[in-house]
Image (cartoon, helix red, strand yellow):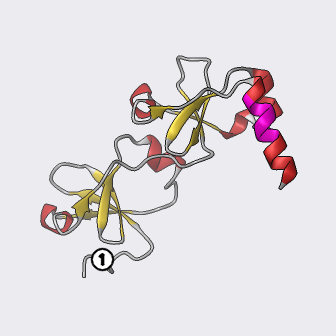
Amino acid sequence: TATSTYPTGALLQNKKTGGVYYVMAGVKSPLVDKIFLTAKFKNKKIIKVAPAELEQYQTVAPYLFGDGELLKTKDSPYTYVISGGKKLLIASDKVFSGLGYKTENIIIVPTGVLYLYDVGVPITEALAGNEQQLINSK
């Protein structure tokens, strides 16, 4: 069945349009940019399929980066962390390093990818301190 064909997930490409979807558990999420292929599915094979096969799956929201991912655009100095499906601006380099983040973990994305996320509350030094206290108390 459509729900069990790709139990661990698969990348399916529409032979006609070239669009790529991540298919899992009977639904398909469009990949709106090739950055997802290089950052999240680097070694995963893309399977070209007929449009009719893709029509078997319900289309859901576009595939997005998950919580904890660090994103920025090449034209902006600002870095965001994804949390609860929202992008949170990291207010300064001090906050960034204070939270233990590393610049090599930042994924450079097109501006359009950042626009897929709602804006959350920026992480300032005060908020970062509270988050660090929560981490230390666990």
Judging depth in this view, the residue of 43 and 72 nearest the camera is 72
Judging depth in this view, the residue of 85 and 116 nearest the camera is 85
Q: SS at mark 1?
A: loop
Is 95 above or below relative to 39? above
At a point 23% along the width and 66% down the height, the residue shown is 57
Is 44 above or below relative to 96? below
Characterize the local packing of mark 1: few (<14), some (14-19) or many (20 or more) Cα atoms within 10 angstroms: few
At a point 66% along the width and 27% down the height, the residue shown is 90
Q: Identify residue for label 1.
A: 3
Residue 25 drawn at (x, y percent)? 36, 72
Q: Main secondary structure of the magenta part?
A: helix
Residue 82 drawn at (x, y percent)? 57, 40
At a point 52% along the width and 25% down the height, the residue shown is 73
Residue 104 drawn at (x, y percent)? 71, 37
The quarter of the image holding the C terminus is bottom right
Direction from residue 38 to residue 13 in the image, left or right: left
Quarter of the image where one finds residue 124: top right
Kind of residue at disc 1: Thr
Direction from residue 93 to residue 9 in the image, left or right: left
Is 66 above or below relative to 122? below
The quarter of the image holding the N terminus is bottom left
Span of residues in magenta: 127-132
At a point 15% along the width and 61% down the height, the residue shown is 51
Tell me how many marks there are. Answer: 1
Residue 74 drawn at (x, y percent)? 54, 22
Residue 94, magenta (yes or no): no
